[in-house]
Image (spheres, rainbow, N blue to C red):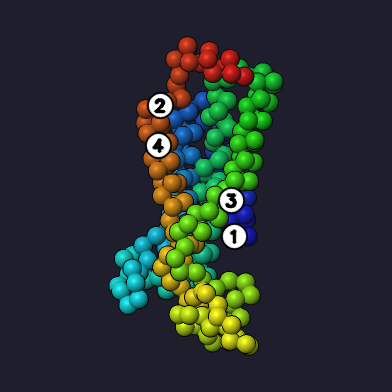
Amino acid sequence: MYSSVVYTLCSVPIGGLVDLFPSSSRLYKAVTASGFAVLALSFAILAPALPRTGPGAPPLSALPPAELNSVSAVMVAMGLKGVGSALSNNAVYPDMVLLLPPDKMTLASASGLWNAAYSLGWAFGPLLGGLLYEASRTAQLCVGHDLASCDAGSGDADGAGVGAGEAVACECEWAPHNGFDSMATIVAAVSAVYGVVLLGACLLNVGALPPSARALRRSLF
């Protein structure tokens, strides 16, 4: 909810600012790069990106995991995610169509490709995230019906269940490498790398294509 509300509130003013500069590919890429930088920070807080290395070990991050593994930290992270999402996608479509012929069919084709790519991302993102979670999980946190063992006060390493004493193979307390942390760390790293790529494209003014490249780009539509 925090991410969606913040995204909605931020998209309108960010879109208005983007419209003030209708011919600057460099600025469009800078706005998108800033969005991915904010997304990287958001997922780094969700991870946390630098947890404790083991029981009793000092934290590698500035804040101990107990501070980052909290509702308030999640609220901040998801709020930042809304800001980052608004910054990262509002300038993409204007940058796509900047050098295209301004006829309706060309713009409609570009819009269709943009929305198709966005929809594919929404479809494949959770699938890829699930695979990352499964691949990186070595310590599982109790979720769903397994939380009953935590509510009953069973928080030991083997996660003994309640009632019939059935074992629950999960941890009731935060533990490093629980899958969620590793997945968020990977997403944070990918977001940061893509932000750097966009920043490089901004500095090199990649959007200013030569006439031959413009003709090729137009022919694709």
Q: Are marks 2 and 4 in contact (CB under 8 Å)?
A: no
The amino acid type, in three-letter code, at marker 4 is Val
Q: CA distance from mark 2 to mark 4?
A: 12 Å
Secondary structure beneath dot 2 equals: loop
**Is residue 202 placed above or below 170 in the rendered structure?**
above
Circle 1 Cα neighbour tier, 10 Å, few/some/many (<14 / 14–19 / ≥20): some
Q: Is 66 positioned to the left or the right of 110 in the image?
A: left
Q: Position of residue 196 (x, y in %)?
A: 38, 40
Q: Which mark sits nearer the N-terminus, 2 or 4?
A: 4
Q: Which mark sits nearer the N-terminus, 3 or 2?
A: 3
Is residue 201 something one can see in this rendering?
yes
Mark 1 sits on what residue? Answer: 2
The amino acid type, in three-letter code, at marker 2 is Asn
Q: Tell me, for residue 205, which label it has, or none.
A: 2
Name the residue at 57% across, 48% down.
125
Name the residue at 64% across, 41% down.
119
Q: CA distance from mark 3 to mark 2?
A: 34 Å
The amino acid type, in three-letter code, at marker 1 is Tyr
Which corner quadrant holds the N terminus?
Answer: bottom right
**Is residue 146 placed above or below 203 in the rendered structure?**
below
Q: Tell me, for residue 197, which label it has, or none.
A: 4
Q: Which mark sits nearer the N-terminus, 4 or 3?
A: 3
**Is residue 159 placed above or below 123 in the rendered structure?**
below
Name the residue at 43% across, 36% down.
198
Mark 3 sits on what residue? Answer: 127
